[in-house]
Amino acid sequence: MGVLRKLTLQKSPSSSNGRKIAKKQPKTTIGSLPKDLLVDILAWVGSSSFTDVFSAKQCCKDFLEATEENYVIQSISLDKFPTIHWFPPSDGVRSFLMNCFDKGNPESLFRQGMIKYFNLGEVESGLEYLKRASEKEHTEATYVYGMILLSQGDRWSEQGLKLLNSMKNSLTRYWDVDDCRNKIKRVLNAMWINNTISVQEISMECQKGDHGVHRIRRLEDEEINSCYFCMWYREFFLFCRMLNIDI
């Protein structure tokens, strides 16, 4: 009993008048957070708001150092910045955007890929940037890269279809093909199109044998039942229409 009483007294210290003394809890500070956790938090914040990350980096040295981590730069949203700068951006904006590109920000790679391929006609480098962004699971880059592969026919079409199906399967819960297509359309509308895709001979008929099994999106206010094979070739038709290509 003496040992138990001693342990009890150690756990619940009291003042001289018998009242219990509350233990002070250690304060949590920015400096006490693991750096990996701080980086994850800022990356999550940056994925929705560049301005919030910019404000955070001015708060303290720990935030400033964390915002320079590759993972944070790669996660930052660029929605506040136009795809095409019709007027020269400030030195600060130019430096920030170049840093995003150099650190492999998927949105930056996607934009450069679109500009290189469709605006400047630099096909190889444009495809490379779109491919790199796709490998980082950038939705719009995967869509465009897959469509370009589909346009090339033969084994490239098979590769493009496989890529698009993998995107559909991995993003089924959150992905909206209409939102994806609309964003791509906005990007294309913001630039002069000096290069399009060369559509090779492609079979547009369902080869799966399960046509009418899967219910997919609405197309021009008409509900359609189809398989994924038919869905992507229907998307291919809409993509070509964005580029004013008749197929």
Image: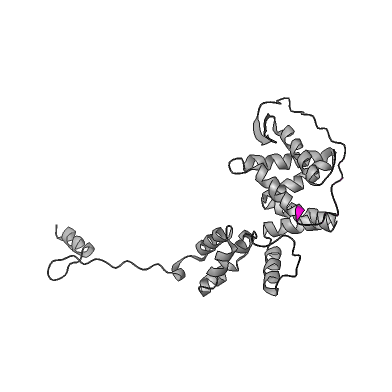
Residue placed most toward the observer, 164 or 232? 232
In the picture, residue 218 is in which quadrant? top right
Q: Quadrant where the C terminus lies?
A: top right
Which residue range is magenta in the image? Answer: 189-200
Q: Which quarter shows the N terminus?
A: bottom left
Query: How many numbered marks appear?
Result: 0
17, 207: nearer the viewer:
207
- Looking at the image, residue 215 sits to the left or right of residue 40; the answer is right
Q: Name the residue: 65% across, 29% down.
A: 214
- Residue 183 painted magenta: no
Q: Is residue 194 magenta?
A: yes
Residue 175 location in percent, x, y?
Answer: 62, 43
Residue found at the very far front of the displayed protein? 221
Residue 9 vs residue 123: left or right? left
Q: Please identify the quarter of the rendering in which residue 100 is found.
A: bottom right
Locate residue 113, reporting x and y percent: 77, 56
Which residue is outermost to the left?
17
Residue beneath the point at 16% across and 70% down: 15
Tell me where residue 65 appears, x and y as whole percent.
56, 71
Identify the colour scheme used: one colour
The residue that appears at 72% across and 58% down in the rendered structure is 109
Measured as percent of width and height from the top left, residue 180 is found at 68, 46
- Tell me which secondary structure the magenta stretch mostly adopts: loop
Q: Is residue 2 left or right of residue 172?
A: left
